[in-house]
Image (cartoon, rainbow, N blue to C red):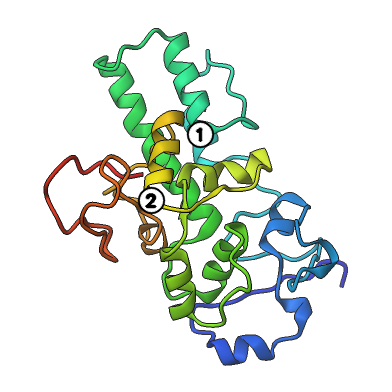
């Protein structure tokens, strides 16, 4: 048939997964952007007609962030730019101070949309091996681990800005990997790319990426995303 749809479920085991033909293993980067940094050497299929159920459809036109900015029609939203820079630009256009009630409401709505957009791109199920493989590919973990346990460990050891993970889907810019939590903290503070924590829409996959931004290196973050020490500010991204 001219259009081939591939479906995976969270019950697929890693052994069965790797017995699938290579054409069933779809490159997440190529399916989203029609480009792949690995080119012909990529271990996943570059199939124009394939779809990944845990990611957004290629024909999808309206995203949670599109919906958010659409609630402010007088702002000319550039969907190809970083979402954080667009939010700050909108605040400037409307002359909102940090303590402005209207800005506070808009910021809360923006954070909800940001989390929901992450979920649409990368999924929420911590037991879905395909979601972990997609995430590992985007943050350039190589070779991509074969099991859930190894994927989780690899991602937990990787320091990336989560807003960048959302942005890369539209900006096509590669996600920067930082050598330490402290370096990630410096970048996040400099760019203002803070990702919301303790959000009602946050899925399990997202929590493996949370880092201490305001106080890097103090305490630790558990799998639930909660900080195990209470000293200092709790803001993470």
- Please give left or right for residue 53 compared with residue 232 in the image: right
How packed mark 2 is, by other alpha carbons closer than 10 Å (few <14, some 14-19, many 20 or more), is some
Q: Up-down: is 121 above or below 133? A: above
Report which residue position mark 1 lands on: 67
In the image, which is nearer the foreground, mark 2 or mark 1? 2
Q: Position of residue 176 (x, y in %)?
A: 56, 47
Q: Is residue 69 above or below residue 63?
A: above
Q: Secondary structure at mark 2?
A: helix
Query: Is label 1 in a helix, a strand or a loop?
Result: helix
Say whether residue 54 is visible.
Answer: no
Which quarter of the figure is the C terminus placed in?
A: top left
Q: Position of residue 17 (x, y in %)?
A: 62, 85
On the image, the x and y values in percent for residue 216 come to 30, 47
Q: Position of residue 81 (x, y in %)?
A: 61, 30
Distance from the alpha carbon under mark 2 to that under mark 1: 32 Å
Q: Is residue 186 left or right of residue 63?
A: left
User: What's the mark number on residue 181?
Assistant: 2
Vertically, is 206 above or below 74? Answer: below
Q: Is residue 3 above or below residue 175?
A: below
- The residue that appears at 52% across and 58% down in the rendered structure is 122
What residue lies at 46% left-to-right and 25% top-to-bottom?
A: 87
Image quarter where the N terminus lies is: bottom right
Left or right: residue 90 compared with residue 61: left
User: Which residue is more in the foreground, 119 or 92?
Assistant: 92
Residue displayed at 26% across by 59% down = 221
Q: Residue at x 76, y 80 (%)?
A: 22
Q: Is residue 142 visible?
A: yes
Q: Quadrant of residue 56?
A: bottom right
Q: Residue furthest left?
A: 230
Which of disc 1 and disc 2 is earlier in sequence? 1
* Mark 2 vs 1: CB contact within 8 A: no
Q: Is residue 21 left or right of residue 214?
A: right
């Amino acid at each position: 048939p001219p259009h081939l749809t591939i479906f995976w479920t969270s019950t697929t085991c890693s052994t069965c997964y790797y017995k699938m033909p290579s054409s069933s293993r779809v490159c997440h980067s190529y399916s989203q952007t029609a480009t792949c940094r690995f080119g012909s050497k990529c271990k996943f299929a570059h199939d124009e007609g394939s779809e990944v159920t845990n990611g957004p459809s290629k024909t999808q036109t309206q995203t949670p962030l599109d919906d958010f900015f659409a609630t402010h029609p007088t702002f000319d939203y550039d969907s190809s730019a970083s979402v954080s820079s667009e939010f700050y630009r909108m605040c400037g256009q409307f002359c909102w101070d940090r303590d402005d009630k209207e800005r506070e409401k808009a910021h809360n709505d923006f954070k909800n949309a940001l989390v929901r957009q992450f979920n649409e791109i990368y999924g929420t199920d911590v037991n879905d091996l395909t979601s972990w493989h997609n995430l590992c590919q985007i943050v350039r973990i190589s070779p991509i681990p074969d099991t859930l346990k190894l994927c989780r460990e690899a991602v937990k050891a990787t320091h990336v800005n989560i807003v960048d993970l959302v942005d890369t889907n539209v900006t096509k810019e590669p996600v920067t990997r930082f050598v330490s939590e402290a370096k990630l903290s410096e970048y996040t503070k400099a760019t203002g790319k803070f990702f919301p924590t303790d959000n009602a829409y946050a899925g399990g996959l997202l929590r493996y990426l949370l880092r201490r931004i305001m106080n890097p290196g103090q305490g630790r973050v558990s799998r639930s995303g909660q900080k195990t020490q209470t000293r200092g500010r709790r803001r993470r991204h």
